[in-house]
Each structure stands twice: as structure tokens, then as C-alpha cells.
Image (tube, rainbow, N blue to C red):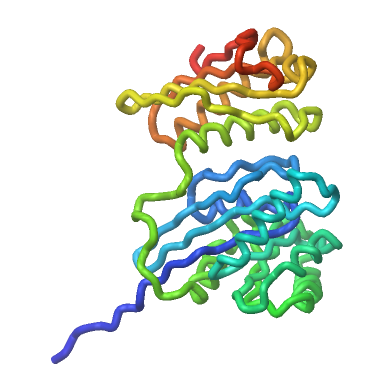
């Protein structure tokens, strides 16, 4: 008697996550892979880079690519670069997740729809569906948006609450090609720990400083050393002006200290070990030879 069973082929592919700014793309990817590899903020345009998040199951590997929100308001050099990142990601994707906010579809969403290729499966993901009080209104909204493109599937979710994410992943898996795994079973991103450290500090910076701080402010990891499980990280926040520097430092260094503490806690959770963190604030025009700044320690 033949008891052999037919095993489904392994599937692996790249899934692009696209949408206008602030619809929850980074939150969705972090929740899908179960780790925070893409920073989140209420402030739009937080994601500047193409960030890859990886989840490997017994029969599939999902390689999610979080993209910057497609910029429509200002045609400056940064926004052009961000938009090029989005369009390049769409070209190379095996599956596309197009995110919209439940109950909201405007010109900025339509501009992203206009970029969607016709030869790649696109799943319409209606995020923040938990915020809709009248659930019956979701159906006509989904029908309205679905008329804009030939979507392969439509899934309402709440990324923040993990609502319907298993259903979404099931839909994605249907469209993944039969391929061997690209990454190892324990990999969660293709980005280095040094890069992730800089992104974590940048997230806390925008969360705690607010809208006053320009997007041109950046984070540079000057040293990243590892001794056993301990990571020693020395970071510089580069700002445009002395006024921005004072804004980041805060009263008697309180704000910078909070940025450092929250960053260290997130790093320890992500890296799975203790972190010693020092952060300096420097003005970009002369940061290389200007060591005047306030030191904030990850440990008190």
C-alpha cells in the first residue's frame, strides 16, 4: 500500500507594500513578520528606504518590501528619489499589496493606483478597518476602490490589531511563485544591524521631537562594536541649525535622554542582547570637526 503523500511545492517571492504616505505600510510589514524592522511614526514620509522584512514558514518564504509613501505634494529631489524607489520596487515584485485607509480614497491614492502594473497580482488591503463604526459601509467602499484596478483579492485588515492578517497572508501565498527560499529560515531582514540601529534612533527622534524637526535631519552610526552579546553603539544626530540642536537636546538634555533610552530598549528587543548607546547632536555644516554636543547615555 502506497502511503506517500504529495507535498505542496515551496513558494517564495517578493511582496511590495505600496500606498500613499501614512496608511500603515511599515506597521503592516512589522506585524506580518513579527518583528520591528521598519520604523513607524504618525509623521508622514518616515520611511525613506526600501526595507525588506522576511518571514519563513514550512512551505513558503514571504519577502516583504516596505516602500516610502508615494509623494504627490512637492516635486523636490528627495521626493523624486522616494518615488523612484516605489516604482522600481513595483517592477520587480511578484505580488503587490496596495494599502488604503478604510473609508478614504483620494487623489493621492489614485496616483498610486495609476502606477500599478497590469501583469502583477495586486491585493487591495483596506487597513484601519477597525476604525469604521458602520461596518456595512466597508462593502460599498471596497467596491468603489475595486473599480479602479483589476485587483486579485480584497482583504480588510487592521495591521495594528493584527485583524485578518492570517487571511491576508493566505491570499498572498496563492500568488507566490514556486521557488526555493532566498534567505535563511531565521533571517528577518536583509538590512544590517547598524542600519537598523540608525533607523530606530530616527524613529524616536521624529516621535519625540515632533513636526518642528525637518526631514533633512539624519542619524549616523559612527561606531558599532559587538563584544559577545553586548553591542556598543555610538550615534550622531545631524541637524541643520543650532536651533534644531537645542530642540533635540531639550531642557537640560531631557529630550535627548528619552530618545536614547527608548532607542536602546527597542534595539535590545530587536537584537536580543544588551546595548550600550551614546547619542550626540551635531550641526551638519561642521559636524565632522565639531564635537560640542550633549552626550546621552543608554544606561543611567
Residue 109 spot, x, y in % from top left: 79, 62
**Could you tell me which residue is drawn at 60 percent across and 41 percent down?**
39
**Could you tell me which residue is drawn at 78 percent across and 72 percent down?**
145
Residue 119 spot, x, y in % from top left: 62, 78
The quarter of the rendered structure image containing the N terminus is: bottom left
Reply above or below: 53 against 61. above
Q: How many marks?
A: 0
Q: Image check: 189 left or right of 86?
A: left
**Could you tell me which residue is drawn at 52 percent across and 17 percent down?**
278
Residue 96 spot, x, y in % from top left: 61, 67
The answer to whether residue 136 of the structure is visible from this angle is no
Q: Image check: 157 left or right of 42?
A: left
Residue 290 spot, x, y in % from top left: 64, 11
Reply above or below: 293 against 82. above
Q: Image check: 9 left or right of 260?
A: left
Q: Of all residues shown, which one is farthest toward the bottom?
A: 1
**Could you tell me which residue is drawn at 54 percent across and 70 percent down?**
94
| Quadrant position of residue 112 | bottom right
The answer to whether residue 162 of the structure is visible from this angle is yes
Amino acid at each position: 500500500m502506497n502511503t506517500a503523500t504529495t507535498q505542496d511545492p515551496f513558494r517564495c517571492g517578493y511582496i511590495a507594500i505600496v500606498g500613499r504616505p501614512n496608511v500603515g505600510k511599515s506597521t503592516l510589514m512589522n506585524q506580518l513578520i513579527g518583528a520591528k524592522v521598519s520604523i513607524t511614526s504618525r509623521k508622514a514620509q518616515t520611511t525613506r528606504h526600501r526595507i525588506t522584512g522576511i518571514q519563513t514558514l514550512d512551505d513558503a518564504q514571504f519577502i516583504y518590501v516596505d516602500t516610502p509613501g508615494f509623494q504627490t505634494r512637492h516635486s523636490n529631489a528627495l521626493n523624486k528619489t522616494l518615488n523612484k524607489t516605489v516604482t522600481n520596487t513595483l517592477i520587480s515584485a511578484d505580488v503587490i499589496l496596495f494599502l488604503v485607509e478604510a473609508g478614504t480614497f483620494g487623489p493621492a491614492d489614485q496616483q498610486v493606483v495609476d502606477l500599478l502594473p497590469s501583469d502583477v497580482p495586486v491585493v487591495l488591503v483596506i487597513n484601519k478597518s477597525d476604525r469604521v463604526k458602520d461596518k456595512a459601509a466597508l462593502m460599498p467602499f471596497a467596491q468603489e476602490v475595486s473599480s479602479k484596478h483589476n485587483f486579485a483579492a480584497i482583504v480588510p485588515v487592521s495591521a495594528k490589531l493584527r485583524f485578518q492578517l492570517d487571511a491576508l497572508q493566505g491570499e498572498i501565498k496563492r500568488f507566490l511563485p514556486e521557488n526555493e527560499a532566498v534567505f535563511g529560515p531565521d533571517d528577518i531582514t536583509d538590512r544590517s544591524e547598524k542600519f537598523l540601529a540608525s533607523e530606530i534612533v530616527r524613529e524616536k527622534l521624529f516621535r519625540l521631537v515632533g513636526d518642528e524637526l525637518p526631514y533633512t535631519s539624519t542619524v549616523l552610526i559612527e561606531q558599532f562594536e559587538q563584544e559577545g552579546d553586548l553591542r556598543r553603539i555610538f550615534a550622531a544626530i545631524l541637524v541643520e541649525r543650532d536651533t534644531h540642536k537645542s530642540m533635540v537636546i531639550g531642557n537640560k538634555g531631557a529630550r535627548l535622554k528619552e530618545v536614547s533610552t527608548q532607542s536602546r530598549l527597542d534595539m535590545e528587543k530587536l537584537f536580543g542582547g544588551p546595548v550600550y548607546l551614546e547619542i550626540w547632536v551635531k550641526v551638519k555644516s561642521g559636524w565632522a570637526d565639531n564635537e560640542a554636543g550633549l552626550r546621552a547615555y543608554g544606561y543611567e
